[in-house]
Amino acid sequence: MDELTQLIKKRIKSKFSSTRRFSEELGIPQTTIVSAIKNGVSGTAFTTVCKMCKALDIKLVNGIYPVVVTDTTKNLIQKMSKLDEKGVHTVTTVLEMEYIRCKTEAEAVAVAEKNARLEAAKNNPIISTDKIPTTSEVGDLVRALNDESDIFD
């Protein structure tokens, strides 16, 4: 998934909590938003992507790099522009260290989730490694197992 799509997905979750609420707010069909998140925004109409980005406070720097522009972001840029060379070096060094820490933690979580899915699939071949079953699917499975045990009692 490309960087812009990932950022859009993350911002929808944090700002609107669901694609349904986001789609209602923007007047864009929910299927369009879900498709854009699932398949990447590159196949979505440019005007739709622009509308989504605007609602999520996302700007493209140099037309390439997606950035969330909040009051905090604007304030940081304003302050950075007033720093001398040593100040800019200090801020960028701390920022790089924090970026690496967060990225490493996110990668560790992703690896742990993947390992948990693989372990679950190994212990129970009914569970797919690609998809964790929904609550209703688990309920259906439990009901089916209970019905089967009634037959053999």
Image: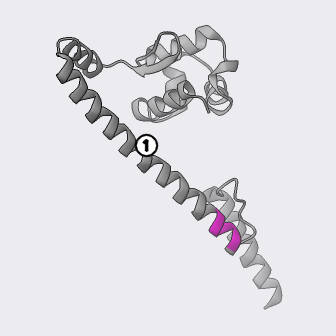
**Picture colour scheme:** one colour
Q: Residues within 10 Å of mark 1 (few under 14, many from 20)?
A: few
Which residue is depicted at the point 82% across and 88% down? 152
Residue 150 showing in the rendered view: yes
The residue singled out by tag 1 in the image is 103
6 to 145, vertically: above or below: above
96 lies left or right of 12: left
Q: Looking at this view, is 87 or 11 the one in front?
A: 87
67 lies left or right of 8: left
In the rendered image, the residue lying farthest to the front is 86
Residue 140 within the magenta-colored segment of the rendering? no
124 to 54, vertically: above or below: below
Which residue is depicted at the point 40% across and 18% down? 57
Quarter of the image for residue 97 reads: top left
Asked which secondary structure carries label 1, the reply is helix
Q: Main secondary structure of the magenta part?
A: helix
Q: Looking at this view, is 47 or 84 the one in front?
A: 84
| Residue 132 picture location, percent across and down | 64, 57
| Residue 64 picture location, percent across and down | 53, 15
Q: Looking at this view, is 82 or 26 the one in front?
A: 82
Q: Quadrant of the N terminus?
A: top right
| Residue 95 picture location, percent across and down | 30, 33
